Amino acid sequence: MSAGRMPSPERQVQEDLMRLEAYRGQLNTLLQQHQILTASRQDHVRARESLEGIDRAAAGTEFLLPLGGESFVRGSVARDAPVLIGIGSGLVVEMDRSKVVELLAQRLGRIDTAVRDLEGKMTSLDERIQQISSRLEAAERSAGAPADVGRA
């Protein structure tokens, strides 16, 4: 194609179809990331609420402590007992409960920021998908309709 020529309508349609497919793939990836962040947020909220529940409970209260795999053990937690928390790469550290609550709040803030950013990207991508889809629908209508149809 030379520098001053416009792409043919067929070529433009093909490029739009490729773009549309790429954008849909990107949107699908962003949706998966959104689901992961949402699940992580729920885990962090549950952890924070569990720690707060322990603080509100009477001394010696028995709890069901989750082990994973829908398995639990009965037990009680001393209020001044430190908490083990994962810090990444499989590492776990022992911290005071108040520090863990603070760390969970910070993580929730970062997750919320990431979710907002991701949702902005998803909205932008969805708008591009809508624009290309509209352009493709218009091209399909004009290719299939006689030149004078729709003009009155």
Image (cartoon, rainbow, N blue to C red):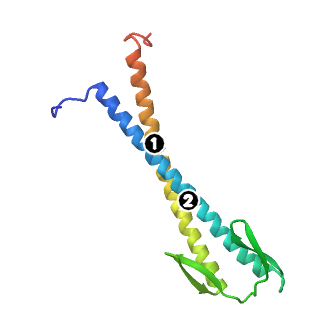
Residue 79 on image: x %, y %: 75, 87
For the N terminus, the image quarter is top left
**Res. 24 image quadrant:** top left
Above/below status of 111 relative to 51: above
Q: Which mark is residue 36?
A: 2
x and y percentages locating residue 126 in the rendered image: 48, 43
Q: Reading the chain from its start, which is encountered first: label 2 or label 1?
A: 1
Closest to the observer, 67 or 109: 67
Q: What is the three-letter code of the residue carrying label 2?
A: Ile
Quadrant where the C terminus lies? top left
On screen, residue 62 above or below 150: below
**Relative depth, front residue between 84 and 11:** 84
Asked which secondary structure carries label 1, the reply is: helix
State the residue at coordinates (71%, 77%). 51
Relative side of 73 to 12, left or right: right
Where is residue 111, by image quadrant? Answer: bottom right
Q: Residues within 10 Å of mark 2 (few under 14, many from 20)?
A: few
Q: Disc 1 designates what residue?
A: 24
Residue type marked 1: Arg
Q: Position of residue 75 (x, y in %)?
A: 79, 81
